[in-house]
Amino acid sequence: MDNSTSKSDKNMEDLTEKSGKKVDYFALKEQQESKFNSKGSAVSEAEAEAMKKAKKIKDKPKFTVKEFKRQWVLIVIGVVYVIYGIIFNYLPLIGWIMAFQNFKFAKGIFKSQFVGLKKFQFLFSDNNFLMVIRNTFAMGVLNLVFSTVVAIAFAILLNEVRNKYFKKSIQTISYMPHFLSWIIVVAIVHDAVSNTGIINEILLKLHIVDSPYNFLAEPNWFWPLVTLSHLWKETGWNAIIYLAAITSIDPCLYESAAIDGAGRFQKMRYVTLPSLRPTIIILLIMNMGNVLNAGFELQYLLGNDVVRSVSRTIDIYVLDWALDGRNMDYSLGTAAGIFKTVVSLTLIVMANYVAKKKGDERLF
Amino acid sequence: MAETEVTLNRPLKKRKKKMATEDVIFYIFNTIFLLLFALVTLYPILNTLAYSFNEGNDAVRGGIHFLPRKFATKNYETVFAKESIWIALRITILRTILGTLTSLFANALLSYILSRKKFLFKSSLSLFWIITMYASGGLIPTMVLFRYLHLTSSFWVYVIPGMVSAFNVMVMRTYMGGIPESLEESAMLEGAGYMTVFAKIISPLCKPVYATIALFVAVYHWNAWFDAMLYNRMDPQYTTLQYELMKLLDNVSTATSGQVSAQQAAQTGGASVTVTPMTVRAAATIATMAPIIALYPFLQRYFVTGLTIGGVKE
Amino acid sequence: MKTKKLVSLALASMMAVSALAGCNSTGTPETTAGGKDTEATTAAPGGDETTAEVTTEATKEYADDEIIDMTMFAAMAGKEKNANNEIKEIIAKKTGVRVQESWLTGQEAGEAIGSIIASGKLPDLIDGGDGSVQLYESGLLVPWDDYLEKYPNLKEMYSEEDWNKFRMDDGKIYWANVFGNIYGEDKTTGQNGEAFWVQIRVLEDAGYPKIETLDDFFKLLEDYAAKNPEMPDGTPVIPYTALCEDWKYFCVENAPMFLDGYPNDGCVIVNVDDPSNPKVVDYNTTPTAKMYFQKLNEEFNKGAMDPEFATQTYDEYIAKLSTGRVLALCDQYWDFAYSIMGPFAQVLEAKDGSKYRLDEMGCEYVPIGLKAPGVSSQAYYGGPELNASSGCAVTTSCKDPDAAFRFLSQLLDQDIHDLRYWGIKDVDYCVDENGLYYRTPEQRENWKSDEYKAAHSCEYSYCPQWLGTSKDGINAMQPQEQVSEFQLGMSEPMKKCFAAYGAETYIDFLGSRDYKPQNPWYPLWSWSNSIGADTDYGTVWKKMAEVKHTWLPKVIMSKDFENDWTAYQEAYNGVNPQVFLDAAQAEVNRRIEAYGVK
């Protein structure tokens, strides 16, 4: 145990000497890995590096009969999951055929008339569709960045609270808005930013504006409002994962950091954040694939005709066009769905590649 | 081992007593900040609560913030007067319990095999599931499939199809990946199989992440209504709580192209077009929120307890 | 189960007793209180009568095990009935069919019908709304044709000519629209369609003038607002507002059609200057359209038009109207009126501490039929509209279609029709010595309560029904059309206003009840509502709407109207609306061809 402490000591010294976030993180990662792997023996950085490489080679699974035999349990379980996945997740993908058809219920998936890429052509020949892609992307990215940063910050700050009851109460309160429907949240947001709402009242009192400012009629304000609404509703909820991850951090790391004289912020920076890194990376990569799913309900409810050019998302657009009185145009909806899937998968493959290059935790 | 813990903790506690000025300032600011944050997030809840206890016709005029203006319990009576709500409650509780248990197990087991570093199909199986997060066949093919699997008009449609969630699996896998391999290795040397390791070694250490995922899944089941509507539309015995509330709330006519027959509106007594009072909406929200929020403190202790990985290093 | 039924029957007759007591003891509909207190003492004499009635009915009742349970789905929003709804049970005993209705929730009609088809689990009865054609194309509906001959009640609903409008391309009838179908004399009291609505206090203040043009209308509002800038509680009045939310923007968008004196064809004006050659005209580009939007723009810049009109949600719009602050608006009646009745009856506190009620101070609205200058007559009230594009249908999943049609037919029997809309005699309504139905205030309150209706009333509101005059020749088929009932519900200022204009009903404000004879294509929106985006003109139609959504608020809020109007018209013409207009013209011609020239 003492050894471990002195090792951490050493690392800590290294850390304080080095500057620049990147290096620090890496060093810390090393530190953590060595914590798990080297079982307390003091190792220099070079040694750790060598060990890591060795470990990688050792971990590389070999497709040998012996290995198959050894892990047959895992393989059997895996097969069960593959069968389940094929039935419930992959079989419905047959429906993608609809994107290339003029799907009619009377004829069904296999007999509807094929129209080739007509539905895709329709989407991409409309300037409005390009506009809604932009909107969706922008709101998706804003959301991803801010909700991640704010949730992590909140989790870390909450973790610093010493009083157990205060901590528990704040945490419970923070995640409550998650259970409100967007209808209610939007009603409150509307109420707050309306001409007679609290925000305008404050602005008027502080003489920042002379007459009430109609935020909802201002296209530039729409994206920030969406992001803020999201933060308000979901920060506490999003923080739950990070809070769970924080609990898994080895207290020894804080101990040793403290012994090395690391202050509060240094501990956050050199212990907490790096320990959260795998979780953050995994969630970031996964959510990257969701930027095109930036939403329907919130934008639909918060938007209006004045801010139409920035408020409409892919989902709103598709619903608008796919619902044509007579029929639901499933073909168009499916085409848009395929487009989103392709973009999403491309994004996560890219993100995953970057993570892999950087030696981080990765998705696959 | 206990010894080490003690020696470790002691100096920390001592340090705690003489807090640096920097720390004091930090605590004050942190507390103020979190209080403000809590206030801001609490507001919509209090506002909803105030509306839920306000008389409906009075509330239409708006302007209610923290307290009801005209107190009434009528809204809750309206919500609970609905007969079907009790059947729905039973189904919802059942699916939440059953759904959470099965889903937790299914996700945990998959995460377990995916987090085994030597598993031959680790990457390919991960990718197989990750794709499911972003690719969906859509409503109609799914409905047709379920029809052939006899999952429509059945309770099991709530439990079986959504058992594995790739998102939850990835979160769990990441967590499990952080557990030292040495534990597994030593157990296996002692003759334990993969399943024993999963049950006896890994799972106990995964309490925080299990609690997190259980919460996610439970909340999902508690709030689910779309599946009830799609697959059990004509089977009121399988209705769910949120579906009943949706039916209560969502009666704004959804005409798409801008023309509703005026006669139709009048002849259905305006029923198809009048919005359910926002007060009833609020009461329904509070009524469904309360039980699931009450679940959290029970799970919370797993977050606070956390892991003491340090202890197992010896 | 048996006992439960018995109990509910007993309960029903007990309620009959108490309410009957209410009628007897009070005698006239005007008296309110008292009924409740005296119910125990006066119950006996009336009670016998009711029980006697129940037993005579009982002879032709279906037994419990003979009653067939059916399901019905209507792709519309609606309120569910409780499982053991009282009137539903009575109707079940009389008809042998009990129908459990379910409604659209959180989906669009087309979407819902699609998923029902895919799930393979159809209800016995269905109103597919916008998704009806999907059901037909999938071959899931039972044709009405044979049953029409068998059940004259159903046949009676429409003339041969009108039934033909329902025929699909295979020549058969698959559904019947149940709304707007008038039996005997038209009894319509309300203007359910679109109109410019103004608070009666504004008219009263100006001495009940005759308002015909937009200019007069806004001058009236401005003058009133200048004189009375505040409500008693100190909040400022809003002279005029409009709603732009999503599809409900039609109140802003289609007013030029009405201003030009045309009925609600929805998508276009059909000009009949030359009766032999009706011509489709786009109301978005007429001089009237420009005049109207220019006026709104002018009022917006003057501050007379609600600055938040373009950003408010429907909820906010209703909230605003509920405060009585809005002096006037343009909307369809059902879109706002039902929601504000409750708040208008609230007792409020003024700034000075005195109490007031909005309906008593004249905040209720009456319709005004504004016209563009030079237009001779208006057509805000267009008479009943037959929308043949959807309706009540029986599906192939129904095990006993004959029973279903028999049931639909029996629903039109006068006694059952009365049960559906008026309720149980002496419980839900009383009959005076002349045979006129009326409701006591208590009964009227009951029928406003959702809980009461869920447990007690059973309208089967998407099944065949009548409007107009009851077969007894005295009453209205449905209570909301009973003129005596309508007038009883009016507030004092309303009565004064009606008297000043010599009006009996809302329709009278819009001129005569004798609406223009309907043209065979009317209403054309039953076509434009169901055109698909998979056609050229359907795509254009959607794009036209998109341009209007984007530009209309901009134009109204513009600082430079002329410029923005030109830009709007350019964008509008950019989507080539002529393609749509040609299709509309073709449809008008087709309908003339198919439904006969008038």
Image (cartoon, coloured by chain):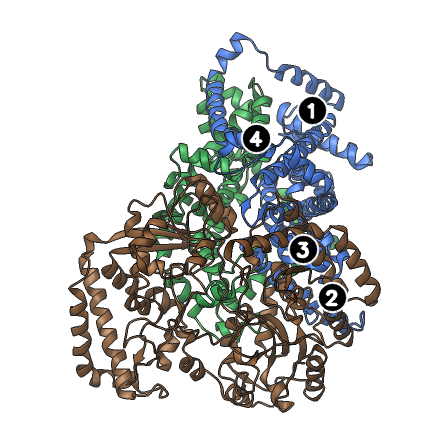
Chain colours: A blue, B green, C brown
For label 1, the crowd category at 10 Å Cα-Cα, with few meaning under 14, some 14 to 19 and many 20 or more, is many
Q: Are marks 2 and 4 in contact (CB under 8 Å)?
A: no
Residue A170 appears anywhere in the view = no
Q: Which mark is residue A97?
A: 4
| Residue found at x 28% / y 75% | C427
Identify which amino acid the numbered label 2 is placed on.
Asn
Of all chains, the one bearing label 2 is A
Q: Tag 3's secondary structure?
A: helix
The residue that disc 1 covers is A42
Q: Tag 2's secondary structure?
A: loop
The residue that disc 2 covers is A214
Of all chains, the one bearing label 1 is A
Q: CA distance from mark 2 to mark 1?
A: 63 Å
Q: Earlier in the sequence, mark 1 or mark 4?
A: 1
Circle count: 4
Nearer the observer, C372 or C399: C372
Of all chains, the one bearing label 3 is C
Q: Tag 4's secondary structure?
A: helix
The residue that disc 3 covers is C545
Mark 2 vs mark 3: same chain?
A: no
Q: Are marks 2 and 1 in contact (CB under 8 Å)?
A: no
Q: Are marks 2 and 3 in contact (CB under 8 Å)?
A: no
Residue A3 x/y as whole percent: 66, 27
Of all chains, the one bearing label 4 is A
Q: CA distance from mark 1 to mark 4?
A: 60 Å
Horizontally, residue C201 falls left or right of residue C454, namely right
Residue A138 appears anywhere in the view = yes
Q: Split into 4 quadrants, where in the image is the N terminus of chain B?
A: top right
Judge depth for marks 1 and 4 and give the one in front: 4
Judge depth for marks 4 and 3 and give the one in front: 3
A329 above or below C32? Answer: above
Q: Tag 1's secondary structure?
A: loop
